[in-house]
Image (cartoon, helix red, strand yellow):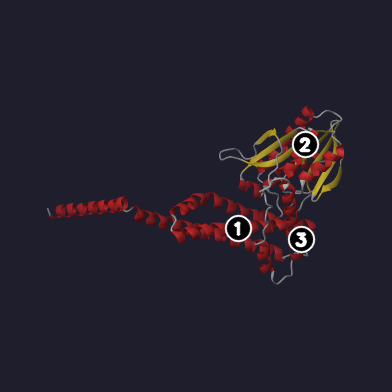
Amino acid sequence: MQLGAQGDITSLIATLLWLLFFAIFFFYPSFSQRIQLSHMLRDLERKLGRLKQIRDDVRSRTLQVLGGYSERKDLDKELDRLVNSFMIPPESMDPYGVVYKLEHIAVTWEDSFEDMVRELCPKADRERAKTLTNLVEVTRGVDLIYRIVRHFYLMGKKTNNIYLVLQLQMLMPQIMEIAEAYRQASYAFSEGQPIGDGVGVLAVAKLVKDAEKKTYEIAKDTVVHELVFEGRRLLAVRAAGPGGAVGRPGEGVKRLVEAENGRVGAIITVDAGLKLEGEETGKIVEGIGVAIGGIGIDKYKIEEIAKENRIPLYAFVIYESIAEAITPMKESIAKAADKVLEKIKAIIREKVKEGETVIVAGIGNTVGIGMT
């Protein structure tokens, strides 16, 4: 009987405590919010610590690789200078001419950034210096992610803003995925391995492989392979490799069209494209327009010159995730480069008459993809 009474008392106390806890949460929501906020901040703190580990890992690898081509004792300080550099976009309040203003600023920044890396690593040859520039850009990217996440974490903690913290917590899975992709990208650039983003360049390289052709530079870090394909004059544009470069395909295509005086029958672009969740990596889709990512300068130039000369624009996109785009190229993506060749050839046969000129531009980073 005494044991039964003790059990009833224990059950009653537990019920009263549960009711008290429920009442506190119901009548004092700020108290429950503070508990939720504390839990979310602890979760964010753990993820921020992991993010810092990724940043430090990428940074230490970059310093190690740069150290093999440099004798500077202040290498760590110089890397900080590069990582903290920035580009201020032009004023767009009056949009007229903003593309060429943006191009001027972007080209100046890219050239000066590359020059600083070369000065830092005088032992590196031209191609290796370009790849090292990409490696420093990866370090800069992951460092920026860490600093932005840390900023919002500290702001949420300082102001006890549960909505700010909640939004950050919701975004953290995607942010951590991107940061991990940057970490994998640092391996690719340090070893000079092809990355997923280079699939467009790889496709063009395969298109002209073993063909009798003339190769020359048309713009900075951008080459043209000139050959004949089934009675059509084929101009294949791509970034020069095997150093890490994307070239200036927009400027290259523009100059080629101007030199041809309107005799271009079609412009075909091939590039990697971001897939949606659930879609197959390496899937090839085709459409109309210009398949080029980035800040839009190259895309604008091709669209503008095509409009002026009434040249049809055809595009092929090979699906991959953002992580797959900047990490070592997967087999499924490399195989897609072979498959897209037949589609390109079919478009040329169908849309371009014999005797006309067709321009095929392979877009992407050419790290690890040599000249054919």
Q: Earlier in the sequence, mark 1 or mark 3?
A: 3
User: Residue farthest to the bottom?
Assistant: 73
Q: Circles 3 and 2: CB distance less than 8 Å?
A: no
Q: Earlier in the sequence, mark 1 or mark 2?
A: 1
Q: Name the residue carrying label 3.
A: 115
Q: To which quarter of the image does residue 226 belong?
A: top right
Residue sitting at x 78%, y 64%: 123
Measured from the top left, where is residue 55 in percent x and y? 59, 60
* Quadrant the C terminus occupies: top right
Q: In this view, does 113 lie to the left or right of 49?
A: right
Q: Can residue 13 be seen in this view?
A: yes
Q: Can residue 339 be seen in this view?
A: no
The CA distance from mark 3 to mark 2 is 33 Å
Query: Circle 2 sits in a helix, a strand or a loop, which is it?
Result: helix
- Under mark 2, the amino acid is Ala
Q: Is residue 39 left or right of residue 103?
A: left
Residue 297's disc number: none
Q: Circles 1 and 3: CB distance less than 8 Å?
A: no
Q: Earlier in the sequence, mark 3 or mark 2?
A: 3
The CA distance from mark 1 to mark 3 is 22 Å
Q: Name the residue carrying label 2.
A: 306
Measured from the top left, where is residue 209 in percent x and y? 81, 41
Q: How crowded is mark 2: few (under 14 residues within 10 Å), some or many (20 or more)?
A: many
Residue sitting at x 80%, y 37%: 359
- Under mark 3, the amino acid is Asp
Q: Name the residue carrying label 1.
A: 144
